[in-house]
Amino acid sequence: MEPNRPTTIQISAPQHAANNPSRVIEREEVLAEAFREFVLTAVAAGWKEPEVALTLADIADDYVMAIARRAAAN
């Protein structure tokens, strides 16, 4: 692993209210940067970039499905 790479990924709090259209752009920028850092950290640890990407997509899909199940149950 690279010696200068942080071991924790910083995610800033939203600066816009939930109903503010700018929040969508802000959310994408903040989370995309965190995502890139996570991928780079995984690759630096020895995982191949394609396997990281596919696994994260699977995890994200599972998470979305779990949220949908919770919403349907309420």
Image (cartoon, grey):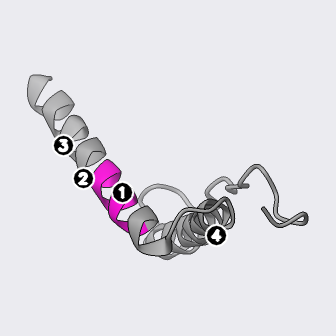
Numbered label attached to residue 63: none
Give the labeled residue for mark 1.
55
Is residue 8 placed above or below 57 in the rendered structure? Answer: above
Asked if the residue at tag 2 contacts the one at tag 3, i.e. Cβ–Cβ closer than 8 Å, the answer is yes
For the N terminus, which image quadrant?
Answer: bottom right
Label 1 – label 2 distance at C-alpha: 10 Å
Label 3 – label 4 distance at C-alpha: 26 Å
For the C terminus, which image quadrant?
Answer: top left
54 and 64: which is toward the camera: 54
Label 4 – label 1 distance at C-alpha: 14 Å
The stretch in magenta equals: 53-60
Asked if the residue at tag 2 contacts the one at tag 1, i.e. Cβ–Cβ closer than 8 Å, the answer is no
Q: Residue at x 24, y 38 (%)?
A: 67
Give the labeled residue for mark 4.
40
Give the labeled residue for mark 3.
65
Amino acid type assigned to the residue bearing label 1 in the image: Thr
Which quarter of the picture shows residue 54? bottom left
Nearest to the eye among marks 3 and 1: give it: 1
Give the labeled residue for mark 2.
61
Is residue 31 placed above or below 49 in the rendered structure? Answer: above
Q: Tell me the SS state at disc 1.
A: helix
